[in-house]
Image (spheres, grey):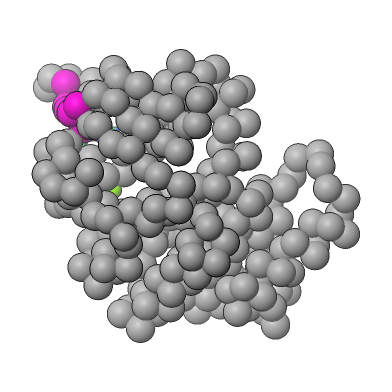
């Protein structure tokens, strides 16, 4: 599904270039649930951003199906993201003045299905994450775990084939983390969505079918 070959990313800095990723070779198969671990600064977020087409590698190739990501135009990358990728972040990134269902529908602000279809798709996803009775609540009226579940529903609204999650349980206590991980497991197993999840938590990493460990921008184990 997604293949990275010799992917290197350096950030320019006045003190010299920082190598965030070095020669990453990685193949992600459809249906995989991959967890990415590694210390702070090991390149985990950079790896996800490159996979999402939000950042271009300095060298190397990234292919999604038969599509080359690293040479795509900005417009093609934007289409790639909205069509294929769902992104979940540690900080939830919900819009504070929009209700739960409005947040879920946010990525749909493009021509396509009629509004009734959009509301019904968003309602189904709120049901999937167990929040259909909170559809008209604002983020501040929801607990941290509930907010992250809204963010997961929002990541699913475009029916992505790949969900990229950057420390999605980093702000949650162990019980709430477990609920989010069960949700990801269900999305992976029942809906066949491929997941790549960065995590600091060994308990969360245990939910995946494969673990990749990064250190100083290189893959240590797994792959
Ligand atoms: N925008 C940036 N400019 C310069 N250096 C950066 C930037 N973003 C990340 N880095 C550096 O790249 C390395 C990898 O960072 P990152 O991918 O955020 O790691 P992680 O998510 O594992 O903590 C670190 O050394 C970090 O300081
Ligand atoms: Mg990070």
- Which residue is at 71% across, 56% downward? 105
Of the four image quadrants, the one with ligand 1 is top left
Question: Is residue 166 visible to us here?
Answer: no
Relative image position of residue 222 (x, y in whole percent): 18, 48
What is the count of numbered marks?
0
- Above or below residue 216? Residue 194 is below
Instruction: Identify the magenta region.
Output: 17-23
Judge from the rendering whether residue 95 lies leftward or rightward of residue 98; answer left or right: left
- Corner quadrant of residue 207: bottom left
Relative image position of residue 41 (x, y in whole percent): 18, 44
- Corner quadrant of residue 171: bottom left
- Which residue is at 56% across, 55% downward? 155
Relative image position of residue 116 (x, y in whole percent): 88, 59
| Quadrant in which the N terminus is drawn | top left
81 or 133: nearer the eye?
A: 81
| Quadrant in which the C terminus is drawn | top left
Question: Is residue 213 visible to us here?
Answer: yes
- Above or below residue 107? Residue 144 is below
Provide the major secondary structure of the magenta segment. Answer: strand
């Amino acid at each position: 599904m997604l293949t990275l070959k010799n992917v290197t990313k350096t950030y320019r800095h006045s003190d010299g270039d920082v190598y965030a990723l070095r020669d990453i070779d990685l193949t992600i198969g459809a249906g995989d649930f991959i967890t990415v671990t590694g210390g702070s600064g090991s390149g985990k977020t950079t790896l996800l951003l490159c996979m999402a087409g939000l950042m271009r590698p300095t060298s190397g190739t990234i292919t999604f199906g038969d599509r080359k990501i690293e040479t795509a135009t900005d417009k093609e990358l934007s289409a790639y993201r909205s069509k294929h990728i769902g992104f979940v972040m540690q900080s939830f990134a919900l819009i504070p003045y929009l209700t739960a269902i409005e947040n879920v529908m946010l990525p749909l602000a493009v021509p396509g299905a009629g509004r009734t279809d959009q509301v019904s798709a968003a309602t189904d996803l709120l049901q999937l994450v167990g929040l259909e009775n909170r559809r008209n609540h604002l983020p501040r009226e929801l607990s941290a775990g509930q907010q992250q579940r809204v963010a997961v529903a929002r990541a699913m609204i475009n029916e992505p084939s790949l969900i990229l999650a950057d420390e999605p349980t980093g702000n949650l206590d162990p019980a709430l983390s477990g609920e989010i991980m069960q949700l990801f497991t269900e999305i992976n197993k029942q809906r066949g969505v491929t997941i790549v999840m960065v995590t600091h938590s060994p308990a969360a990493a245990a939910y995946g079918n494969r673990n990749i460990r990064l250190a100083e921008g290189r893959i240590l184990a797994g792959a």
